[in-house]
Image (spheres, rainbow, N blue to C red):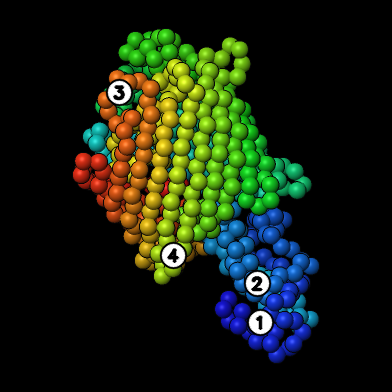
């Protein structure tokens, strides 16, 4: 890339047919390696096309920027780019890619608890595991469609089907997702005690739930997305659960049926969505739970988040995210309340804690150093989708601040007080969007320990 840039610059100086501040016309754009992915899907991601002109001083940056956009389709293991000047003075731009293995059928194994640390604290018993079979077809028909089938049993029995098509219209701006899920549980968390979920175990089904949803996504320009989702929820619990916690569904009810509608806006300008080092992301959503007269739930909640990623130079990077949620005042069933401690909404160091509340504030900061970033050759593996393994290692320093509001004044645990967590860690990033994080946090009161997480940070 640098050689091409240098030769192009020399050619411009010697040829005299264009100045450094002027533009060059794109004569051709070529894609190599997209054996299944349709070329029009890739061209949709580029912010230039044939007959457009690029300024000489921005040439390398624009081509690299669009290479990252192709990577963010999650269709490829790697994407390379180069360009050269043709005899007529115009540009030829080339993108070479290695496609992922798109059809996967594999055994599924995951822990039923909120994270690895929570599972370990409960005795690391594999009876608290979920296992089964998953079928995943990415890039279905070469158009970046996705078909997912999950059949799981163990701690929770679940069947889930989903179909995603991001390009419904000719302009490739409108997408749709259909999903259907059914699950049953013989082990159910029915309340929170001292920031810890309390489970009831049984030989019979304690909880049953199924959901169906349709979501439409509109893409404006390249980075702005708006989504509208309609979802129906049906859930039942055993009489014993309602007796132990009458607020689970409210008023001792054993059944909950309601529809919900959600609107979301997202602005995503990151270099690599799985593990971003540069860019920014903004998310805003509003959800109304209960929109029909007979719905048994009636409240709204709004969320907002902004994440900023900075390249500090010398292989140092800074990530900072602020996230907040507010909910309608009044009674909300226990089954529908989520404060901090679920999924990735937590203060690091509080992985073992569930902090219930209707509103929360979370600020997470991570300083990273790129210790290693390379591609390992594995010649003994014959499949090209697996014999080139990108791997990166980042030592990290992090500090988080969080607050959960709970209107129940009798709450004596971690709600209604400021929480802090800071510490050191290591992030490991490899192919197929796998990110493993090992942290050594220090939280309020000087508690220490080791935490492990798998998945994206933001």
Q: Which residue is mark 1?
A: 8
Judged from the image, the secondary structure of the residue bearing numbered disc 1 is: helix
- Could you tell whether 199 is left or right of 221 in the image? left
N-terminal label among 4 and 3: 4
Q: Which mark is residue 312?
A: 4
Residue 119 makes an appearance in the image: no
The structure residue drawn at horizontal position 37% and vertical position 63%, both measured from the top left corner, is 369
The structure residue drawn at horizontal position 42% and vertical position 22%, both measured from the top left corner, is 335
How far apart are the two marked residues, 2 and 4, measured between alpha carbons?
23 Å
Residue 84, given in percent of the width and then of the height, sits at: 67, 78
Q: Do the CB atoms of the residues marked 1 and 3 lie less than 8 Å apart? A: no
Residue 189 makes an appearance in the image: yes
Q: Which residue is mark 2?
A: 59
The structure residue drawn at horizontal position 43% and vertical position 51%, both measured from the top left corner, is 320
Determine whether 224 is above or below 180 in the image.
below
Determine whether 103 is above or below 57 in the image.
above
- Count neighbours of disc 4 (C-alpha within 10 A) and say few if under 14, some if 14 to 19, many if 20 or more: some
Q: Which mark is residue 411?
A: 3
N-terminal label among 2 and 1: 1
Residue 307, given in percent of the width and then of the height, sits at: 48, 49
How far apart are the two marked residues, 4 and 1, measured between alpha carbons?
29 Å
Determine whether 392 is above or below 207 in the image.
below
User: Which residue is at the front of the view, 24 or 131?
Assistant: 24
How far apart are the two marked residues, 2 and 1, measured between alpha carbons?
10 Å
N-terminal label among 1 and 3: 1
Residue 301, given in percent of the width and then of the height, sits at: 51, 28
How far apart are the two marked residues, 4 and 3, measured between alpha carbons?
42 Å
How far apart are the two marked residues, 2 and 3, measured between alpha carbons?
58 Å
Q: Quadrant location of residue 208? A: top left
Judged from the image, the secondary structure of the residue bearing numbered disc 4 is: strand
Q: Do the CB atoms of the residues marked 4 and 1 lie less than 8 Å apart? A: no
N-terminal label among 4 and 1: 1
């Amino acid at each position: 890339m640098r050689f091409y840039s240098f030769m192009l610059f020399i050619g411009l100086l010697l040829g005299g047919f264009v100045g450094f501040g002027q533009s060059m016309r794109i004569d051709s754009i070529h894609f190599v390696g997209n054996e299944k992915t349709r070329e029009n899907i890739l061209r949709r991601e580029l912010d230039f096309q044939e007959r457009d002109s690029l300024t000489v001083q921005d040439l390398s940056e624009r081509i690299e920027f669009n290479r990252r956009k192709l990577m963010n389709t999650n269709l490829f293991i790697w994407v390379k780019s180069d360009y050269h000047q043709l005899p007529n003075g115009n540009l030829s731009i080339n993108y070479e890619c290695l496609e992922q293995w798109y059809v996967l059928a594999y055994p599924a194994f995951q822990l039923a608890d909120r994270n690895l640390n929570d599972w370990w604290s409960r005795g690391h018993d594999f009876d608290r595991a979920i296992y089964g079979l998953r079928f995943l077809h990415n890039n279905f028909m070469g158009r970046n469609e996705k078909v997912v089938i999950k059949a799981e049993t163990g701690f929770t029995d679940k069947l889930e089907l989903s179909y995603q098509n991001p390009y419904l219209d000719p302009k490739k701006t409108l997408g749709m997702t259909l999903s259907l899920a059914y699950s049953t549980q013989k082990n159910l968390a029915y309340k929170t005690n001292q920031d810890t979920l309390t489970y009831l175990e049984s030989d019979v089904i304690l909880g049953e739930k199924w959901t169906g949803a349709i979501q439409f996504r509109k893409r404006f320009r390249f980075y702005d997305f708006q989504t509208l989702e309609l979802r129906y929820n049906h859930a039942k619990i055993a009489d014993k659960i309602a007796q132990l916690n009458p607020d689970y569904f409210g008023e001792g009810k054993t059944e909950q049926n309601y529809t919900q509608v959600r609107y979301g806006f997202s602005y995503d300008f990151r270099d690599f969505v799985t593990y971003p080092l540069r860019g920014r992301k903004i998310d805003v959503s509003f959800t109304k739970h209960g929109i029909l007269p007979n719905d048994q739930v009636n409240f709204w909640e709004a969320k907002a988040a902004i994440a900023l990623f900075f390249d500090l130079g010398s292989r140092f990077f800074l990530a900072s995210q602020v996230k907040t949620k507010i909910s309608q005042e009044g009674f909300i069933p226990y089954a529908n309340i989520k404060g901090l401690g679920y999924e990735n909404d937590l203060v690091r160091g509080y992985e073992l804690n569930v902090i219930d509340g209707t509103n929360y504030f979370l600020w997470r900061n991570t300083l990273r150093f790129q210790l290693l970033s390379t591609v390992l050759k594995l010649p003994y593996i014959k499949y090209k989708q697996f014999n080139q393994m990108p791997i990166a290692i980042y030592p990290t320093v992090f500090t988080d601040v969080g607050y959960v509001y709970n209107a129940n004044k009798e709450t004596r645990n971690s709600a209604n007080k400021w929480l802090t967590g800071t510490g050191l860690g290591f992030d490991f990033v490899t192919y197929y969007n796998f990110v493993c994080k090992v942290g050594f946090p220090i939280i309020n009161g000087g508690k220490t320990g080791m935490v492990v997480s798998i998945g994206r940070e933001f």
